Image (cartoon, rainbow, N blue to C red):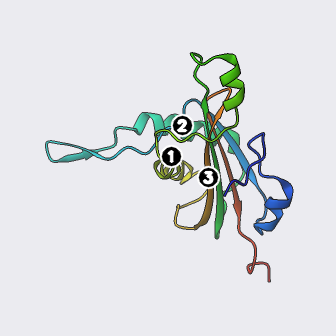
Amino acid sequence: MNVYDDNGCVPLDIYNSFNVGQFCLYTVPGRPAPLARPRFRSGVVWDCQRLLKGQVRECIRVQHGSVGMITGPVVLYCSFSFMVPSSWSRRKQARYRQAPYSGRPDLSNLVKFIEDCIVGIVVADDAPIISFYAQKRYDTTNCTTIGIAPYTKGYDE
């Protein structure tokens, strides 16, 4: 389900149908990164993405500011933008701008990486994410747009 308009934003009528509260939006520049598998060396497990996760977390932390963590169930929105190859003709580049991106990396690992990065900054844990809406698409730049909001239906009594 594509819930994003041509600018990568959730249209207001669709946004309102999700029954969410305050919407927080973050943009992470650079090519979207998938969650890598854990690495093993000499019987020790280590995170090969520790530095990259730290950079993405710092970018989110700066944009989040002094706002507190969101508590309770949340809805996550992710738009992963991949730059149209410069080797393509201008006509082909124009045709593919905003088109779906079906190449690697796969969408589920991209979302897992973002879930790991928002923990401790936006939410205390990734368990309260009750649903997510994600897409991969071509665009003029590489970036990841993350939206997160508390789910409010049934919790406003």
Q: How far apart are marks 3 and 2 (CA)?
A: 13 Å
Q: Does the CB distance between marks 1 and 3 fall below 8 Å?
A: yes
Q: Which residue is drawn at 61% across and 52% down?
A: 134
Q: How far apart are marks 1 and 2 (CA)?
A: 7 Å
Amino acid type of the residue tagged 1 in the rendering: Leu
Please name the residue that numbered disc 2 is placed on.
32
Which secondary structure, mark 2? loop
Task: Tell which residue pokes out farthest to the left in this image.
Answer: 42
Please name the residue that numbered disc 1 is placed on.
110
Q: Does the CB distance between marks 1 and 2 fall below 8 Å?
A: yes
Q: How far apart are marks 1 and 3 (CA)?
A: 9 Å
Amino acid type of the residue tagged 2 in the rendering: Pro
Quarter of the picture holding the N terminus? bottom right
Q: Residue at x 65, y 65 (%)?
A: 74
Amino acid type of the residue tagged 3 in the rendering: Ala
N-terminal label among 3 and 2: 2
Q: Quadrant of residue 150?
A: bottom right
